Amino acid sequence: MTRTQVACLTATAALAVAAFFAGRGLHPGGSSVSPFDLDADAYEAPSAIAGLSKAGFSGFTEGGAEGRTVISGRVISVTPDSITVESHGGRSTLRLSGQGQPRRLEAASKEAIRPGVTVIVRRDPGSDVAKAVLVISN
């Protein structure tokens, strides 16, 4: 080995030792760090099924603790006594009674929106613009 080769090997070894100690000096406190919150609670499935909510999609109850359950989705089948609706939460088959008569939604003007009527308003997240207003009752 020539003197130049020995000098290069010595310089490389010295640089490696210096880098090792510099890296140890920069290491944070000696404890391991995780990118995850290891103290977080375990995942639990939501208690409510998507498509089912109390009192018109808002999550609040209507008329006491029971409230009314609203199911929204696509109609799969209809018989004279029942209707089957498919939503994100699955399929629901409901009996049709004389009390819950079908209603058809029709276009209305802004005059239909007045104090005392019940409405459902759809808006985009983070916006205060009403994209759709459904007048439920007068």
Image (cartoon, grey):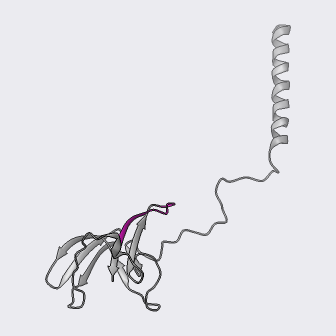
Q: Nearer the viewer, residue 126 or 57?
A: 126
Q: Can you tell which quarter of the image residue 113 is in?
A: bottom left
Taking the image as drawn, is residue 55 in sight?
yes
Residue 113 within the magenta-colored segment of the rendering: no
* Residue at the extreme front of the image, as rendered: 111
Give the magenta range. 125-134
| Quarter of the picture holding the C terminus | bottom left
Residue 34 % position (x, y): 68, 54
Seen at 41% across and 82% down, the residue is: 55
Seen at 72% across and 52% down, the residue is: 33
Residue 131 within the magenta-colored segment of the rendering: yes
Residue 69 % position (x, y): 37, 83
Residue 128 % position (x, y): 49, 63
Q: Can you tell which quarter of the image residue 6 is in?
A: top right
Q: Nearer the viewer, residue 31 or 7?
A: 31
Q: Nearer the viewer, residue 134 or 11?
A: 134
Residue 122 % position (x, y): 40, 67
